[in-house]
Amino acid sequence: MTVLDTRSQSTIVGTIAAGIQSRLTSVFLNFAKGKVLRALAETYAGNGLWLQKENLQIAMLTRLATSYGSDIDTFIADFPLSGVTRLGAQAATGLCTFSRYTAGPTIAYVPVGGTVRTTDGSQTFQVYADATNPAYVATYVNTDGSLGAYAIAAQVNSVTAPVIGATAGSSGQPGSNGNVGASTIGLISSTMPGVDTVTNPAAFTNGFDVESDASVMARFALAVAGRGGGTIAAIQSAVANLKVGMTSVVLPNSDINGNFTPGVVSVIVDDGSGNISAALLAAAQTAVYSVIAEGIRPGIYAAALLPINVVMQITTAAGYVHQNVVAQVSAALALYLNGLGQGATVGYFELSTVACNVSGVAGIVPTSYTLNGGTSDITGTAQNTPKANNLVIS
């Protein structure tokens, strides 16, 4: 981003004084506070600051590179053919396991609209309807009169139901998008008769805050680069415009495995989760077909989740509680892995560095540390998105 040269009032006053004094070598002028010359210089400086502010405002309104916030939105609104608008926040979704202590002879229900929270109470999630879930009963009437619930069958202990974050990052608070680690949801915060416990077996990673200024500007540049259609930039722009967090890898004249295939373009897409929905994949297919060149055979595929398993034994520095440091290392590794993105390589030594950067870690026992059962990097491919799966830290 271009950095504009600006000056403060004191700098402008000093420049005026130096300029006048340099032209009168035989006379020393008094620019002390309260003197007439100082007052005149400050008057000119005030006018200069006003003109400087006007120029900055014009730059903000007329150049995307110097804009921020709502000025970016109004700038790109002047170019509707780009198809770019700031993408809204997205709440994380995932699966929770609802259980009861005893598998009784009666059926218990997890109502649609029921709420659960993380064990620290900081984030709330709501059960939503999924007709494809075999346990979903669309006609069940809940205590509040609403319809839909997930049944814990007789003589069965638990059921798995989908939940979504109550907020989608619109508050602007870090973490309000609902991305949480595995086993961090543990409180039932609404009425669920016969249901005793809840947990999330896997981390939630597909939540995003409102798109950042940098991301909007990058997508706008990509849209301009691909405006003619039929180019890699055009394909990537069409996919990126679907929702915040969307990425794509384009393989021209290649099948999905990288084999040379003239006339074929393979596009592998992901929404940051490694588990893109069928509806979003269909939307990506439509977007790619809208910009693909005539005669080209496109194939649009979803990136697959690449589970990352880490076994690591750490030693703790004096003065630290070992189990607390273990929890912090696990959280740091999960945050790092879940933020790598599509096609990223997971470095064996990079993970050890992440762990060692946690306060209280004195070292790692070399013979205990494995990454997916081995001691080498896991090379990323366009077909995969790495995510933390099982982190065994001791």
Image: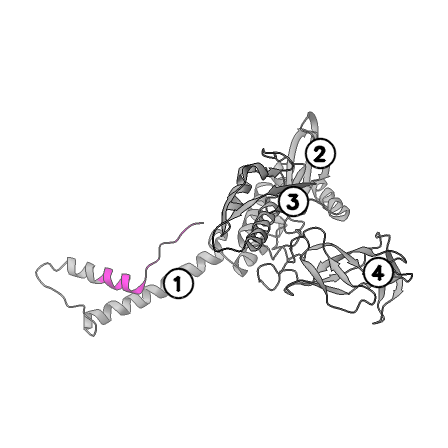
Residue 292 seen in this snapshot = no
Residue matched to label 3? 387
- Kindly identify the residue that appears in the image at 54 percent across and 54 percent down: 213
Whether the residues at callouts 4 and 3 have beta carbons within 8 Å, the answer is no
Q: Nearer the viewer, mark 2 or mark 1?
A: 1
Whichever of callouts 2 and 1 sits on the residue coming sooner in the sequence is 1
Whichever of callouts 2 and 4 sits on the residue coming sooner in the sequence is 4
Residue 265: quarter of image: top right
Secondary element at tag 3: strand
What range of the chain is rendered magenta?
1-16
How far apart are the alpha carbons under marks 2 and 4? 62 Å
Q: Pointer 1: residues within 10 angstroms few (<14), some, or many (20+)?
A: few
Residue matched to label 4? 102
Q: Is residue 54 above or below residue 247?
A: below
Q: Nearer the viewer, mark 2 or mark 4?
A: 4
Secondary element at tag 2: loop
Residue matched to label 1? 53
Secondary element at tag 4: loop
Could you say where residue 108 lies in the image, as x and y percent from the top left? 86, 63
Identify which amino acid the numbered label 1 is placed on: Lys
Q: Nearer the viewer, mark 3 or mark 2?
A: 3
Identify which amino acid the numbered label 2 is placed on: Glu
Could you say where residue 233 lies in the image, as x and y percent from the top left? 60, 39
Could you say where residue 367 lies in the image, as x and y percent from the top left? 57, 36
Residue nearer the viewer, 233 or 164: 164
Residue matched to label 2? 294
- Is 334 contained in the magenta span? no
- Kindly identify the residue that appears in the image at 62 percent across and 42 percent down: 311
